[in-house]
Amino acid sequence: MIGDTMSGIIDSYIPVAIFLAVGLIMPPMTMFMVKQLSPRSKAASKYTTYESGSVPTGTARIQFNVEYYLYAIAFVLFDIEVLFLYPWATVYKGHGITSIAVVEMFVFIFILLFGYVYLWKKEALTWVK
């Protein structure tokens, strides 16, 4: 009786063991195959920057203005806001929400608007020319 149960448990883990074995073998095997089958070239053109088929001019390193990064961070923050608003809106539409939840959402939106006004006053949303 116990042997049959143990055998059934072991049999149920066979697909997991196969999946694990394939998962552990495939990455090194793929890397080995790429190394063996890839063409090898020591040409100087291999080490240059690709610029749509034209000859590269100047350096590839350029300096970006820090304000671009701040603009991107502000975008990500307001994008995450949508991640919080969407589930609330779907629950509100489907099941009905108490007045406490509506007040909480207005507080959340007020905090976001406060942050937006702060960014606007600091001129962080002004595009740099």
Image (cartoon, rainbow, N blue to C red):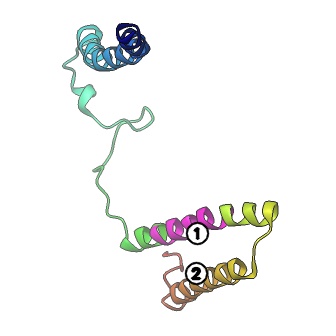
- Name the amino acid type tagged 2: Leu
- Closer to the chain start, of discs 2 and 1, is 1
The quarter of the displayed image where residue 114 is located? bottom right
Magenta residues (range)? 73-86
Mark linked to residue 112: 2
| 49 vs 80: above or below | above
- Name the amino acid type tagged 1: Glu
Q: Does the magenta stretch include residue 85?
A: yes
Badge 2 density bin: few <14, some 14–19, many ≥20, Cα 10 Å: some
Residue 35 screen position, x and y as percent: 23, 14
Along the line of sight, the residue nearer the viewer: 47 or 113 = 113
Q: Disc 1 marks which residue?
A: 81
Q: In this view, does 126 lie to the left or right of 32?
A: right
The residue under the point 36% across, 65% down is 64
Q: In this view, does 39 lie to the left or right of 109?
A: left
| 61 vs 63: above or below | above
The overriding secondary structure of the stretch rendered in magenta is helix
The residue under the point 53% across, 84% down is 115
Q: Which residue lies furthest to the left in this view?
A: 42
| 66 vs 47: above or below | below
Residue 91 screen position, x and y as percent: 73, 62
Question: What is the spatial separation of the Cα atoms under label 2 and label 1, in whole angstroms?
Answer: 8 Å
Residue 99 screen position, x and y as percent: 75, 81
Q: In which quarter of the image is the N terminus?
A: top left
Badge 1 density bin: few <14, some 14–19, many ≥20, Cα 10 Å: some
The residue under the point 53% across, 92% down is 121
Q: Is mark 2 on a helix, strand or loop?
A: helix
